[in-house]
Image: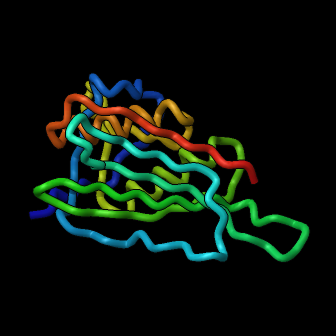
Amino acid sequence: MADIVGSEQRNSKTEMEPSNMKIRMTQKKILVARDTGSHKKTIAKFTLITADLDVPVRVRWFVRRSSMSVPDPTVYCNVWIHAERFDISGRGRYGGGGINMNAAAFQGALDSCGVELYGDDDCRSYVDDGGDSAVDSACEAIAKSMGYLKFKIVREDFQL
Protein backbone atom coordinates (compact mmCIF):
# COMPACT_ATOMS: atom_id res chain seq x y z
CA MET A 1 0.00 0.00 0.00
CA ALA A 2 1.44 3.35 -1.03
CA ASP A 3 1.51 6.24 1.38
CA ILE A 4 1.13 9.25 -0.88
CA VAL A 5 1.94 12.68 0.47
CA GLY A 6 0.41 15.76 -1.15
CA SER A 7 2.27 18.83 -2.25
CA GLU A 8 4.23 20.38 0.58
CA GLN A 9 6.37 23.41 1.12
CA ARG A 10 10.06 22.68 0.61
CA ASN A 11 12.02 22.87 3.85
CA SER A 12 15.66 22.51 2.81
CA LYS A 13 16.88 24.20 5.99
CA THR A 14 15.89 21.25 8.21
CA GLU A 15 18.97 19.68 9.79
CA MET A 16 20.09 16.65 7.81
CA GLU A 17 21.26 14.55 10.75
CA PRO A 18 20.51 10.82 10.49
CA SER A 19 19.65 10.66 14.17
CA ASN A 20 16.66 12.94 13.71
CA MET A 21 15.72 12.13 10.12
CA LYS A 22 12.71 9.99 9.30
CA ILE A 23 12.13 8.13 6.06
CA ARG A 24 8.86 7.41 4.31
CA MET A 25 8.96 4.84 1.52
CA THR A 26 5.90 5.45 -0.64
CA GLN A 27 6.44 2.39 -2.85
CA LYS A 28 7.60 -1.20 -2.34
CA LYS A 29 8.84 -2.03 -5.83
CA ILE A 30 9.90 0.59 -8.34
CA LEU A 31 12.81 -0.17 -10.61
CA VAL A 32 13.71 2.74 -12.84
CA ALA A 33 17.51 3.03 -12.54
CA ARG A 34 19.33 1.89 -15.66
CA ASP A 35 22.77 0.70 -16.59
CA THR A 36 24.42 3.71 -18.15
CA GLY A 37 26.53 1.90 -20.74
CA SER A 38 29.64 3.30 -22.34
CA HIS A 39 28.18 6.67 -23.35
CA LYS A 40 28.26 7.95 -19.74
CA LYS A 41 31.22 8.60 -17.43
CA THR A 42 30.97 7.79 -13.73
CA ILE A 43 32.00 10.75 -11.58
CA ALA A 44 31.19 9.37 -8.12
CA LYS A 45 29.94 6.22 -6.37
CA PHE A 46 28.51 5.77 -2.91
CA THR A 47 28.03 2.38 -1.27
CA LEU A 48 26.67 1.71 2.21
CA ILE A 49 27.95 -1.65 3.50
CA THR A 50 26.56 -3.24 6.66
CA ALA A 51 28.40 -5.37 9.23
CA ASP A 52 26.84 -8.45 7.56
CA LEU A 53 28.25 -7.27 4.19
CA ASP A 54 24.80 -6.41 2.87
CA VAL A 55 24.63 -3.44 0.52
CA PRO A 56 21.26 -1.80 1.21
CA VAL A 57 22.06 1.51 -0.52
CA ARG A 58 24.08 2.17 -3.68
CA VAL A 59 24.32 5.49 -5.51
CA ARG A 60 26.10 6.33 -8.76
CA TRP A 61 26.56 9.76 -10.34
CA PHE A 62 27.58 10.21 -13.95
CA VAL A 63 27.81 12.64 -16.86
CA ARG A 64 27.39 12.12 -20.57
CA ARG A 65 30.47 11.45 -22.60
CA SER A 66 30.70 14.04 -25.33
CA SER A 67 32.60 13.88 -28.57
CA MET A 68 32.47 17.67 -28.62
CA SER A 69 34.82 19.91 -26.67
CA VAL A 70 31.91 21.39 -24.68
CA PRO A 71 30.81 18.94 -21.96
CA ASP A 72 27.15 18.42 -21.06
CA PRO A 73 26.72 20.15 -17.67
CA THR A 74 23.96 17.75 -16.55
CA VAL A 75 24.74 15.35 -13.68
CA TYR A 76 22.74 12.11 -13.58
CA CYS A 77 22.19 9.88 -10.56
CA ASN A 78 20.97 6.32 -10.04
CA VAL A 79 20.05 5.02 -6.58
CA TRP A 80 19.32 1.41 -5.59
CA ILE A 81 17.75 0.52 -2.22
CA HIS A 82 17.49 -3.17 -1.32
CA ALA A 83 15.92 -4.82 1.72
CA GLU A 84 13.90 -7.92 2.52
CA ARG A 85 10.62 -6.02 2.30
CA PHE A 86 11.30 -4.04 -0.86
CA ASP A 87 13.60 -3.45 -3.79
CA ILE A 88 13.47 0.00 -5.34
CA SER A 89 15.62 2.14 -7.56
CA GLY A 90 15.37 5.59 -9.02
CA ARG A 91 17.07 8.00 -11.33
CA GLY A 92 17.45 11.75 -11.28
CA ARG A 93 19.35 14.51 -13.00
CA TYR A 94 20.27 18.13 -12.47
CA GLY A 95 21.67 20.55 -15.00
CA GLY A 96 21.24 23.93 -13.36
CA GLY A 97 23.55 25.89 -11.15
CA GLY A 98 23.72 27.42 -7.73
CA ILE A 99 23.53 24.24 -5.66
CA ASN A 100 25.46 20.99 -5.30
CA MET A 101 24.71 19.18 -8.57
CA ASN A 102 25.33 15.68 -7.16
CA ALA A 103 22.98 16.28 -4.23
CA ALA A 104 20.31 17.75 -6.51
CA ALA A 105 20.50 14.75 -8.88
CA PHE A 106 20.35 12.42 -5.84
CA GLN A 107 17.20 14.20 -4.63
CA GLY A 108 15.65 13.61 -8.04
CA ALA A 109 16.51 9.91 -7.83
CA LEU A 110 14.92 9.65 -4.35
CA ASP A 111 11.81 11.42 -5.63
CA SER A 112 11.53 9.06 -8.61
CA CYS A 113 11.56 5.95 -6.40
CA GLY A 114 9.22 7.32 -3.75
CA VAL A 115 11.62 7.97 -0.85
CA GLU A 116 10.77 11.00 1.27
CA LEU A 117 12.88 12.46 4.08
CA TYR A 118 11.44 14.17 7.17
CA GLY A 119 13.10 16.05 10.03
CA ASP A 120 12.17 16.12 13.74
CA ASP A 121 9.43 18.66 13.07
CA ASP A 122 7.80 16.24 10.56
CA CYS A 123 8.44 18.73 7.75
CA ARG A 124 9.71 17.26 4.52
CA SER A 125 13.47 17.68 4.08
CA TYR A 126 15.44 17.84 0.85
CA VAL A 127 19.12 17.10 0.28
CA ASP A 128 19.49 19.03 -2.96
CA ASP A 129 21.28 22.01 -1.47
CA GLY A 130 22.97 20.20 1.41
CA GLY A 131 25.94 18.72 -0.45
CA ASP A 132 27.75 15.44 0.19
CA SER A 133 27.13 15.42 3.94
CA ALA A 134 23.37 15.65 3.34
CA VAL A 135 23.58 12.69 0.92
CA ASP A 136 25.52 10.72 3.56
CA SER A 137 22.95 11.59 6.24
CA ALA A 138 20.05 10.61 3.99
CA CYS A 139 21.62 7.24 3.13
CA GLU A 140 22.40 6.57 6.80
CA ALA A 141 18.77 7.37 7.69
CA ILE A 142 17.53 5.03 4.95
CA ALA A 143 19.75 2.22 6.27
CA LYS A 144 18.62 2.83 9.86
CA SER A 145 14.97 2.81 8.78
CA MET A 146 15.58 -0.68 7.35
CA GLY A 147 16.98 -1.86 10.69
CA TYR A 148 20.72 -1.65 9.95
CA LEU A 149 22.59 -0.14 12.87
CA LYS A 150 26.22 -0.84 11.97
CA PHE A 151 27.47 0.14 8.54
CA LYS A 152 30.27 1.85 6.68
CA ILE A 153 30.05 4.34 3.85
CA VAL A 154 32.42 3.88 0.92
CA ARG A 155 32.60 6.92 -1.36
CA GLU A 156 34.59 6.99 -4.57
CA ASP A 157 35.12 10.17 -6.57
CA PHE A 158 36.49 10.02 -10.09
CA GLN A 159 38.22 12.66 -12.18
CA LEU A 160 36.43 13.98 -15.24
Viewport quadrant of the C terminus: bottom right
Q: Is residue 101 above or below residue 124?
A: below
The residue sitting at 58% across, 49% down in the picture is: 44
Query: Vertical placement of 43 versus 19: above or below?
Result: below
Identify the image quadrant of residue 157.
Answer: top right
Residue 91: x percent and y percent? 45, 64
The answer to whether 47 is drawn above or below residue 39 in the figure is above
Compared across the picture, whether 47 is left or right of 96 comes to left
Q: Residue at point 91% right, 68% down?
A: 69
Count of numbered labels shown in the rendering:
0
Can you name the residue that lies furthest to the right here? Answer: 69
Residue at 43% in and 41% down:
126
Residue 9 is situated, as x and y percent measured from the top left of the image, at 40, 43
The answer to which image quadrant residue 152 occupies is top left
Query: Would you place residue 134 above or below residue 41 in this image?
Result: above
> To which quarter of the image does residue 22 belong?
top left
Residue 62 in percent (x, y) is at 61, 60
Using the image as rendered, state which of residue 117 and residue 30 is in the foreground. Answer: 30
